[in-house]
Image: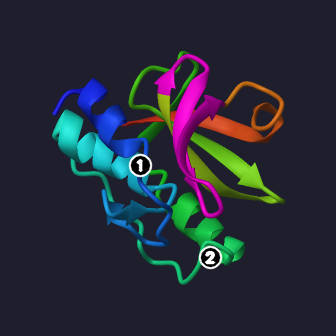
Amino acid sequence: MTASEFFKKAGHVPFVEGGRDYDGWDCWGVPYCFHRDVSGILLPEYLRYSSVNDYKQLKKIIDGARDGWRRITQPELGDVALFKTGKYESHVGLVVDHNRMMHAEKTIGTFVERFTGLAWGLRLEGVYRYGGC
């Protein structure tokens, strides 16, 4: 699958907590499926949390999952932007280009928006690229 084909298919995927396919996914499902289907890379699934509202548990997972990821300063297609929601890092988006991401939210589903703008820019913890473990 090409990146363009992925974005066409992904644009209407609903939010499903713990989802990892085109029938529904959570915020991690977007980069997970992109890398699986476009890049041929099987990222960790990170399914060890009980709810997207369990931010303390998500923080533990994120902190423990940094192996294999490196922080980058020039975002490219396929990188993952990590955001704070409240005081915890608990939301991700798939980088589409240097300032836009595709991500999934519970009340909206999957969509593309700027991660450098007012809504997300101040909450951006960093952008990461996966290199394996």
Residue drawn at the location 43% of the way across and 41% of the way down = 11
Find residue 2 and report its horizontal and vertical position in percent: 20, 27
Badge 2, how many Cα within 10 Å: few under 14, some, many 20+?
Answer: some
The label shown at residue 102 is none
- Judge whether residue 35 can be spotted in this image: yes
Q: Tell which of 126 and 107 is nearer to you.
A: 107
Residue 105: where, in percent of width, then height? 61, 56
Q: CA distance from mark 2 to mark 1?
A: 20 Å
| Residue type, numbered disc 1 | Val
Name the residue rendered at 70%, 74% in the picture. 56
Mark number, residue 57: 2
Q: Which residues are magenta?
A: 96-114
Q: Earlier in the sequence, mark 2 or mark 1?
A: 1
Q: Examine the residues drawn in magenta and state their main secondary structure.
A: strand
- State which quadrant residue 25 falls in: bottom left
**Which amino acid type is shown beneath numbered disc 2?**
Gln
Q: Write the residue at 55% across / 60% down.
A: 62
Q: Which residue is mark 1?
A: 30
Q: Nearest the camera: 52 or 68?
A: 52
Instruction: Work out whether residue 132 can be spotted.
Output: no
